[in-house]
Amino acid sequence: MHRTPPATVGGRARPALDTPGSPAVESPRSPRSTSCREPPNLREGTMAATRWYLKGQGYEFCNCQFGCGCNFGGFPNSQDGSCRALVGLAIGEGRCGEVDLGGVKCAGLFHWPKAIHEGHGRAVFVVDPATTDPQVEALAQIFTGQLGGNPWEILGPTFTVQGLVRAPITIEGRGRKSTFRVEGVGEGRGDTLKNPVTGEDHLVDVVLDRGFIWTRGECGAGSFQASAAGLSVAAERSNWIYYQFEWSNAA
């Protein structure tokens, strides 16, 4: 899912995820005022955005070939040239203003018809039921790029958010051999690449010194399928990367 940071993007949208209520699937609306909301004149440069940071583990399944062509040439090497992905996050430490985000588990279903930087993507976000309303609002503003900071100030303008789902999230295994499961939505199952002669694990890492999502990814072969709020993504034995992330909008 990596891209060279674009100067412009083809899709324009920064909607925020709604604060969850009783429905399992909710439509995005503008965020209510919270301690993590962006100052209204941020884009005029007269005020600083609320500080945020996230640190944890990422589980990235996409329909590209192993390693993901986007990491090398900026364009998908999937069969149809699209980018379809299930991305899970386990946030170990995090904060947005006064909102503690440590321990939150969440996921995103993404579909871009072509390269991510060309825009016109769609996204559905999933949060574990234990996620509080202030945490959801904080993540909404981070993931749609409203507060700045990589990678979301780059990714946020390339997609529209078409739903928010609350569903239990479980993670099994470790590292490359992990399963990221969202109850009632779908799952991604990861494994190592295999030596074609011996069948033994073939351990491959991708290092991106200037990567804006991750700098070291543990590559493997994965299969995933997920469907929620009118968006479905799936692929068999395609790219899967486990990584550590540390993101923020600090200067």
Image: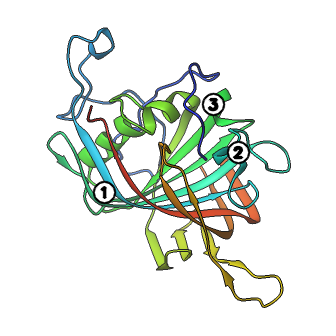
Residue identified by numbered label 1? 131
Q: Secondary structure at mark 1?
A: loop
Instruction: Please state the horizontal and vertical placement of residue 65, each as a whole percent of the image.
Output: 76, 58
Q: What scheme was used to colour the molecule?
A: rainbow
Q: Secondary structure at mark 2?
A: strand
Tell me how far mark 3 sits from mark 1, CA to CA. Answer: 30 Å
Residue identified by numbered label 2? 83
- Residue in the foreground of this view, choosing between 51 and 207: 207
Instruction: Please state the horizontal and vertical placement of residue 40, each as a whole percent of the image.
Output: 26, 15
* Numbered badge on residue 197: none
Using the image, determine if residue 170 lies above or below residue 38: below
- Residue in the foreground of this view, choosing between 66 and 183: 66
Question: Which amino acid type is marked by label 2?
Answer: Cys
Instruction: Please state the horizontal and vertical placement of residue 47, each as a whole percent of the image.
Output: 20, 16
Q: Secondary structure at mark 3?
A: helix
Comes first in the chain, label 3 or label 2: 2
Comes first in the chain, label 1 or label 2: 2
- Residue in the foreground of this view, choosing between 147 and 128: 147
